Amino acid sequence: MLSLTNRAVLAGSLALATLAGLAPTANAGDDCRWEMKITRKALVSNTFEVELWAHFPDDAHAFMRSVLDVQTSGVDWFDFGDCLLGGQFAEPGLVSGDDVVGIDVGQSHFPPAMIFADTANPIRVWCREFEAKTGAPYRSVLASTDLFRYYIDASSSETQTCTPIEALRHVFVNPIVIDDWIAATFEDTIGIPRGDGLLLEAEGTAVPEIGAALTDETASWSPGSQFEHTINVNRMPLAATFELDWFPWWQTPGRLREGLSASMTKTATPGGPPVIEVTPDFGDVGVRRVPSRLILDGTRVGDPILGAGAAITLFNPCFELTWCYVLNTNDQLVLVLKCEDPFDIEIGGRRYTVDTIELDPQQAPGTVGGMDRAEVRATGTSTIEITGAGFTGSCVADCDGSGELNIFDFLCFQNRFATGDPAADIDGDGSLTIFDFLAFQNAFAAGCP
């Protein structure tokens, strides 16, 4: 990887003086919020370590104190660990049923007595382990806060109270491990690993509903990251309906539990092959009309807006439709449907030939930090075949994909921008502007793992 100095010099070769007076964009770092990190102790273990990290406003000095509970169900808590934040307050909480209540953690900051708080942001304040009992396919773990305070500046002990964004995460119990991703089947569903994928079948003769949740617990989410799952639509019977749901790690108020949804139904056509109706629903996150971008061979061919309840009709799509949950450079969510080969679609009475459809909830920058899980359910069929899934990461700055950062990445980006390639939309706002140059410059200066 290039050194930071060399990257900065190269980045400076882009003339962006016109941006000098622009105000910074607010992001999740301006809020108080919890970050919950959950680590499975071993590949097939049902024992997990939970860490709570406190984020406070960027212009504040240090974390001061929090009183909170950690709520879940169907678990046994044990082991306080050695990561409790010390100082004036250090109560790890008491186990009450499935919850840990009365956690009280904090630190002192009193400059006249030469007592100084740790200014790390975020700062780890609490950890503990639990073992999930058998039963439901996954467990939810929620931070519920009574008090959150931070020190305003370095020179005094003055504090400020805020209402933090709570953290909610899920962990799978007895997961099916397939390559780098895992699945948890729902009630009345049997999961059978098959190659890189998973065959879901109804248990018994009744077919009320079958399905599974999918995730990658080891995914390190960063701009350009995506989690894919591919569904074999050739095995979808006519009139069967697949319900798809994606649940992000929301980092802004009011987005704790809501997700994005879509349904797929195969329908017969007179004298022709079946078509697939895809109906996205982003109503739970406040988006009634869904902006979309239609792409063929990397070139945008349309950007229609789907009204509430409107569907996309797919004609002759590939047998394996791939859904991707993607983070752009501003930690904004984009949902992508793609095929290896072009296919025809109809939106609002107009036909297009595409290979990729991007559905954009248009959330604020910093809204999400990754994906908690995807869920696939079906009615009207006894079989779902997920032919592949998994996490892929990419580095925005490595435009030419060479594995190193140099002047050719700038030339690659400039060529994409000049030709209107959607890949040049680095800031994810749906249009190519000078801000994409700035976003690429920042990504280049930051470097790639």
Image (cartoon, helix red, strand yellow):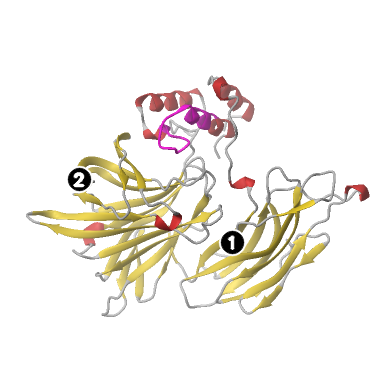
* Residue lying farthest to the left in this orientation: 271
The image quadrant where one finds the C terminus is: top right
Q: Give 407 or 273, whichever is nearer the viewer.
A: 273
Is residue 79 at least partly visible in the picture?
no
From the image, tell me which residue sits under label 1. Answer: 38
- Seen in the image, is 403 located left or right of residue 93? left
The image quadrant where one finds the N terminus is: top right
- Seen in the image, is 285 located left or right of residue 35? left
Q: Position of residue 275 (x, y in %)?
A: 18, 54
Residue type marked 2: Gly
245 over 341 or under it: above or below: below
Q: Which residues are magenta?
A: 424-441
From the image, tell me which residue sits under label 2. Answer: 349
Q: Give 312 or 447, whichever is nearer the viewer.
A: 312
69 over 18 or under it: above or below: below
The quarter holding residue 45 reads bottom right
